[in-house]
Image (spheres, rainbow, N blue to C red):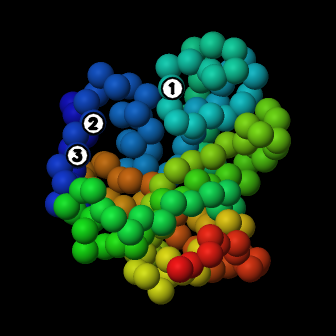
């Protein structure tokens, strides 16, 4: 059965024929971040895939991860293309390197997850929160429920972590 939901007024449909994403978002619906751990080499990977990105093997298990990490890059959106986002600009899309598997398989191929910056409650972050986040900010995963057994993983500031002064692009 397809996973269906709604986020910011947009209808979301995830067909069950997309086995890997269907399973990934099912774990998210339980508020658990689980990633594929490949049996051939023990490495975790994201996004979900039918084959290991390093050796092409197809056997894996869904391994729980803590969902904490460091912002490696971000995009600050000021011009929303989708109508659902127009009243929510600026918002941030974060590329976060997870604490698990840091520097593996190489320093350039760490485990990284892309998602929006949100409040701890899962709402897109307001401008005063957006300005506090940059490269180096410590974040943790939260889940925005969008349907029964269906949630989107998102990032929020990890208030329990020591926070460095983040680097941000100069503002005009």
User: Can residue 3 be seen by looking at this rendering?
Assistant: yes
| Residue 32 appears left or right of 73 | left
Residue 99 lies left or right of residue 118; in this view the side is right
Q: Residue at x 38, y 53 (%)?
A: 152
Could you tell whether 77 is left or right of 157 in the image? left
Residue 12 circle label: 3
Regarding mark 1 in the picture, which secondary structure is present there? loop
* x 71%, y 67%: residue: 136
Label for residue 49? 1
Task: Name the residue located 40 percent from the left edge and 73 percent from the top edge.
Answer: 90
Snapshot quadrant of residue 101: top right
- Say whether disc 2 or disc 1 marks the residue closer to the N-terminus: 2
Q: Real-space Cα distance between discs 2 and 1?
A: 15 Å
SS for dot 2: strand
x then y, percent, for residue 74: 56, 60
76 vs 96, nearest the viewer: 76
């Amino acid at each position: 059965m397809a996973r269906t939901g709604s986020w910011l007024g947009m209808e979301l449909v995830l067909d069950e024929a997309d086995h890997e994403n269907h399973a990934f978002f099912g774990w998210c619906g339980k508020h658990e971040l689980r990633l594929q751990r490949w049996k051939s080499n023990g490495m975790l990977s994201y996004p979900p895939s039918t084959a290991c990105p390093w050796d092409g093997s197809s056997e894996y298990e869904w391994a729980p991860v803590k969902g904490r990490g460091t912002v490696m890059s971000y995009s600050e959106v000021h011009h929303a293309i989708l109508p659902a986002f127009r009243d929510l600009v600026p918002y941030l899309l974060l590329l976060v390197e997870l604490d698990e598997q840091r520097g593996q398989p190489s320093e350039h191929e760490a485990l990284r997850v892309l998602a929006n910056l949100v409040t701890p409650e899962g709402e897109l972050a307001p401008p005063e929160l957006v300005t506090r986040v940059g490269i180096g900010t410590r974040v943790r995963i939260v889940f925005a429920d969008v349907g029964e057994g269906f949630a989107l993983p998102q990032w929020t500031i990890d208030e329990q972590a020591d926070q460095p002064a983040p680097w941000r692009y100069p503002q005009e």
